[in-house]
Every structure is written in C-alpha cells, then in structure tokens.
Image (tube, helix red, strand yellow):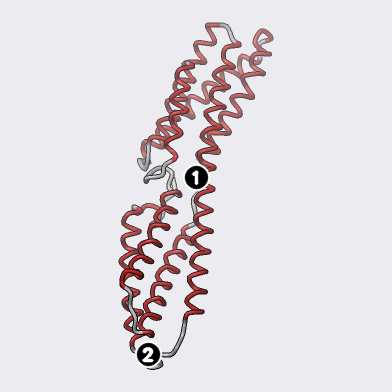
Amino acid sequence: MKHSMLYDLDAHYLILILFVLMIITVYTGYKFGSKHVNVKSDHSMLLSSLLALLGLLLAFTFGMAGSRYDERRAFMTNESNCIGTAILRADVYPDSIHTLFKKDFAKYLNARISYFEAGRDEAKTLTAMKEAAESSNSLWKRASNLSLSKEYYLSSMLMIPALNEMFDSASTINESFNATVPDSIVSLLFIFSIVSAFFIGYNCGVKKIFDKLLVIGFCLLTCVVIYIIIDLDRPRRGIISSGTQIHLFRELKEML
C-alpha cells in the first residue's frame, strides 16, 4: 500500500490548509503591492499567463486522476467477469470435483471482496491478499493436477486459461490501486495555487482595489477543484470511490 505525507493526510485537511495559505498569501501580496509607488503599473498580462498556466496544470492533473479512476473501474469489471467465467468453467467437471472448486472460488471471492472493503486498513488489506493467494494456489493445484489425468484433460484445458486470466486481472487491480498521481505533481499544484494567490493579491495592491468576494471565490473554487482531483486519486477513501463496483463481486456469489 502506498505511503507518503501527502497521500496519508486526509484530503479535507490538505484542502483546508491550502485554502488558509492562499488567503494569507493573497493578503501578503496585497500588502506588498500597496507599497508600490507607481500606481499605473499593469501586471495583467503576467497575471493572466500565470493563471492560464495554473488552469493548464489543473486540467492536466484532473485528466490524469480521472483516467486512473476510470481504469480502476474497468479493471474491477474485468476481474469480476474473469471470476464469473472461471466459476462457470467448473461446471465441466463431475459434481464431486465441481463442489471442491466452488468452495475454493467462494473463499477467493470473499477474499477479493474483503480486499476492496478494507479501505485504509493495511492489516485487513494484507490479510485479504494472503487469503486470496491461498485460495488461488488451491485452485491452481487442483486444476493442474487434474490436467495430468486423461479423463479431465479437456476440462482442465478450459479451466486453466480462465484461472490465468482471473489471477492476472487481480494483479492488475492490486497495482492500479497503488498507481496514483505522483506527489511531485500534487505538490507543484499546491505551489502554483499559492504563488497565483500571491500575485493576485499583489496586483490588487498595486491597483489599490481589493475585491474580497472575487478573491475568496478564486481561492475556494481552486481548492474545490484540487479536492476533487485528490479524491479521484484515492480509491480507498473519499466521496468518489471505486467501491461502487464491489456489487459486481457480491453478485457472483449467486453463482456458487
């Protein structure tokens, strides 16, 4: 599981800190700008360029977080389909063997559901991964041993590829849950937001005009967008979660 100062800290606290820093920075910039002697100085072009760069960075990071969110949902749908296919392949075996497969599939499915429901509890996540590994080993050994028998060779040739796809899809999802927007990009986003706030305050100070509503609105909207980016990038917590796809795995229990 990924660990870093930015990733471990709750998004609400991060955004609250950013909002307070932006407000303080705007006020600091205004104080610096109000000391400017030449009132006719115009920094609008520079400010526009800076805000455009901030907007570009926000759009880039939002797109990166959004694509990762969509990928996780697609991967979860694919894994549920792979598990469903493997469960159906167990029907090609006689009832005695079919029952053993179904028991292992039930354990594996419960382990995968526990993995997605573990949230930020690392102990539960590791336990779920261990249980899934034990169940997958049991499934693989049974299928590979049965493939050595001429009687079950054809049946096993159907089951083994399905199990391969099921295990590969699980590995893909496990990796995707740790693949987030790099902390360096998130840090850069924070820095640009604070710098932009400073120059907005500075420009207001030079012009001796300070619109509180406009300044607070800019800071608030910027923080809201960054909050959504961070929330999209954290699959195990937050308002926008990949957990909505868990129902696909629960529905597979009806096949057992």
* Front in this rendered view, residue 129 or 42: 42
Whichever of callouts 1 and 2 sits on the residue coming sooner in the sequence is: 2
Label annotation for residue 159: none
x, y percent for residue 229:
44, 54
Left/right placement of residue 87 relative to residue 29 reads: right
x, y percent for residue 251:
45, 23
Left/right placement of residue 138 relative to residue 28 reads: right
**Residue at the location (51% across, 38% down)?**
73
* Front in this rendered view, residue 194 or 90: 194
**Position above or below: 6 against 109:** below
**Residue at the location (50% across, 13% down)?**
100
Looking at the rendered structure, the secondary structure element under dot 2 is loop
Badge 1: few (under 14), some or many (20 or more) residues near its Cα, within 10 Å? Answer: many
Task: Name the mark nearer the viewer: 1 or 2.
Answer: 2
The residue beneath circle 2 is 36
x, y percent for residue 58:
49, 61
Q: Name the quadrant of the N terminus.
A: top left
Badge 2: few (under 14), some or many (20 or more) residues near its Cα, within 10 Å? Answer: some
Alpha carbons under labels 1 and 2: distance apart: 47 Å
**Position above or below: 254 against 20:** above
x, y percent for residue 140:
57, 22
Looking at the rendered structure, the secondary structure element under dot 1 is helix
Location of residue 89 by image quarter: top right
The residue beneath circle 1 is 69
Name the residue type under label 2.
His
**Residue at the location (54% across, 22% down)?**
84
* Front in this rendered view, residue 65 or 197: 197
Name the residue type under label 1.
Tyr
